[in-house]
Amino acid sequence: MVTTIPVSCQFSNISPQIIISENGGLSTGSFTLNCNKNFELQLSSKSLKDGDVSTSVKTGNGEKLNTIVMVNFIGNSYELDEVKQIRVLDPSSSELGVISINLASPVHATTPAGVYQDVLYLDATF
């Protein structure tokens, strides 16, 4: 008799949004990734995919503030200064990831007002 175990990876407990402090303070979010097979996790952002050299938040009319994005995953810390590939060869059943974001420089009175946004992408392949 052969027993087949389905292979799966599933994200859960994803922070829906991370609101960045305007004074440069650190803001955090998290996610859980459950996999029962070796996998690769790709970390990227809309700003990086759009060709920026660093992560940033932008307004609809193009105003931009640079950010620093750190992802702690499986005991390692990764700065999202480019698209990152993380290979996991011995996953546990559940891996917690913590995302920390802050502005590279605090805003000033001359910083244009607006809603600044970016999107963080997490893609698991197995």
Image: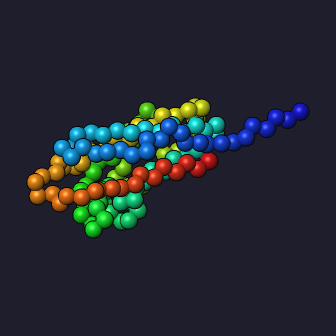
User: Residue 35's spot in the image, x, y percent?
Assistant: 60, 38
Q: Is residue 93 above or below residue 57?
A: above
* Total marks in image: 0
94 lies left or right of 113: right
Point out residue 40 in the picture as x, y percentages from the top left corner: 54, 47
The reply to whether residue 85 is in sight is: no
In the image: residue 43, left or right of residue 116: right
Q: Would you say 18 lies left or right of 102 here?
A: right
Frontmost residue, 102 versus 78: 102
Question: For residue 28, which quarter of the picture?
Answer: top left
The residue at the point 30 percent across, 40 percent down is 27
Name which quarter of the figure residue 97 lies in.
top left
Q: Is residue 1 visible?
A: yes
Nearest the viewer among 75 and 102 is 102
Colouring of the image: rainbow
| Quadrant housing the N terminus | top right
| Rendered residue at 36%/60% (across/down) | 47
| Residue lying at the far left of the rendered structure | 109
Judge whether 13 appears above or below 104 on screen: above
Looking at the image, the residue that sits furthest to the bottom is 61
Spot occupied by residue 100 in the image (x, y as percentages of width and height):
34, 41
Q: Residue at x 17, y 48 (%)?
A: 106
Q: Nearer the viewer, residue 89 or 56?
A: 56
**Most extreme residue toward the right, as rendered?**
1
- x, y percentage for residue 53? 31, 61
Q: Residue at x 69, y 42 (%)?
A: 7
